Amino acid sequence: MSQEKVIVLDFGGQYNQLIARRVRECNVYCEVYPHSISIEKIRQMQPKGIIFTGGPNSAYLEDSPICSKEIFELGIPILGICYGAQVMAHLLGGSVKTAPTSEYGKTEVAIHASSALFTGVSPDTVCWMSHTDYIEAPPAGFQITGHTPVCPVAAMECPQRSLYATQFHPEVMHTAQGQLMLSNFVRNICGCAGDWKMDSFVESTILAIREKVGSGKVLCALSGGVDSSVAAVILAKAVGKQLTCVFVDHGLLRKNEGDEVESVFGPDGPYDLNFIRVNAQERFYRRLAGITEPEEKRKVIGEEFIRVFEEEAKKIGAVDYLVQGTIYPDVIESGLGKSATIKSHHNVGGLPEYVDFKEIVEPLRLLFKDEVRQAGRELGIPEYLVSRQPFPGPGLGIRIIGEVTAEKVKIVQNADAIYREEIANAGLGKEISQYFAALTNMRSVGVMGDERTYDYAVALRAVTTTDFMTAECAEIPFAVLQKVMNRVVNEVKGVNRVVYDLTSKPPGTIEFE
Ligand code: XMP
């Protein structure tokens, strides 16, 4: 991995990931660490720069997250953002207080162009503010480099010590020239060369894994999703035949998906690895017979998946490493502690207890979803795999309301394939975050060629979202929906009605169960 990196110290703000993201967009490698990281660890890492994130606390209160004052003596440039700016001011003897009025939203900030942080930024630039406390007076030796009518210290710096701070958030897109400010910080102030690229990440990760794994045996549970596919290819490139990928086809995948995965990872594909496809369709259908309650279905699918995987793992015997396709947002989420369980998500995350291995390898741990896709493209993985939309672990099992049967799986697979084909034909794929067909458990009367029918209704779902926590129904042109309807009722046996789900999330969820 590139030596040149900037680290972000997380003080609990909602934009911590975004800061890392923006820095990487400057082609500088960046990682996020808890604010409590030791000074010793920072010294060892030798970052070229440090960024303090925002956060919801008040820097002057006793229990608020803070870092050691020693950090300012390391000689490493630091940029404090929002709460991070207040932490800097507070620790160095400035005054931080509750502001007379809080500022929230787009705000014009008068900035001083002489600051190296603001090179090329216009003097009255629009920035995103979100604070109730403010810096009333900067520490000794600092100069004020930006202000608003409410905020006397919207930016401050001590260039002699390479310390910079902004009350506003340069990382969010509402700060018109925020990316330029971050680039000024990492390039001009920290002196980063900015030569980090995805191909260098892929290359150095392969080398690092090769070194770590040595002649050890590696096992990977391949789901066919983007993350596990990219992780598997990285491992395959690093250690070849020492890797065994187990792909459990639970019969709840999209149409042709099992074969697509096999064509990439199987013996006819381009990679030199051991590939085991377990055709467990019948076994899953048998276990699911008669089960209608959504959580029960999820539980059964999850348990059965683990059982099948465990049986395969036993055949392979002890392995040294288990690969997981964990990506950066998973790391952050699991670090924060989850709120109430709305649905029990089934992921390979539960596997380690069941498999005999020494250590987990997570080659994508530091990447965001679109960076994972980019890495996949670098690795030459086919586009249809790399750009795949999210697909839940329990698969079509939770897109068939009520009991799952082989017949219903066929219906939903065929309807979904038509839907996806027409969305692609209309060129809408990139605008919609997730779209799929589901089988309602409802049958209704229809008429087809003078015959009375009593068949299923298929529901089409399409949403736009950035975080999948909230979502809006996508506005698909009526003509496209009509075409899908026409094709589904004509081509999919057992369906005589098609409905479009308009529900946003909340109150709905994206999946039906
Ligand atoms: P919901 O239905 O909760 O879905 O609004 C939000 C996102 O999560 C995906 N999802 C899952 N992903 N295992 C997964 O890996 C699961 O059990 C699961 N359930 C839902 C869903 O497809 C959507 O993208």
Image (cartoon, helix red, strand yellow):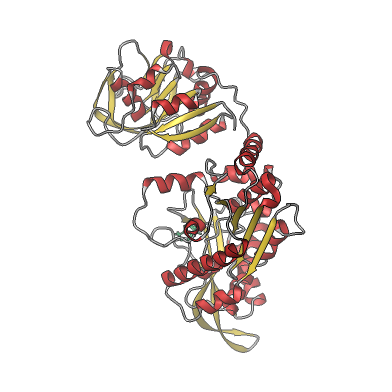
For image coordinates 59% across by 45% down, the residue present is 372
Q: Where is residue 277 drawn, in percent x and y?
A: 66, 65
Front-most of 232 and 391?
232
**Up-down relation of residue 32 to residue 277 (above or below):** above
Residue 150: image location, x then y, percent: 29, 24
Residue at 47 percent across and 76 percent down: it is: 402
Quadrant where the N terminus sits is top right
The number of numbered discs placed on residues in the rendered structure image is 0
Q: Could you tell me which quadrant the C terminus lies in?
A: bottom left
Is there any visible trace of residue 483 in the rendered image?
A: no
Where does the image place residue 452, in percent across and percent down from the top left? 58, 89
Residue 207's quadrant in the figure?
top right
- Nearer the observer, 407 or 239: 239
The residue nearer to you, when weighing 38 against 381, is: 38
Q: Nearer the viewer, residue 143 or 442?
A: 143
Q: Is residue 253 visible?
A: yes
Report x, y in % for residue 284. Answer: 55, 74
Name the residue located 43 percent from the left edge and 53 percent from the top edge.
470
Q: Residue furthest right?
A: 268
Does residue 77 appear to the left or right of 202 in the view shown?
left
**355, above or below 32, in the image:** below
Instruction: Give the image quarter of residue 29.
Output: top right
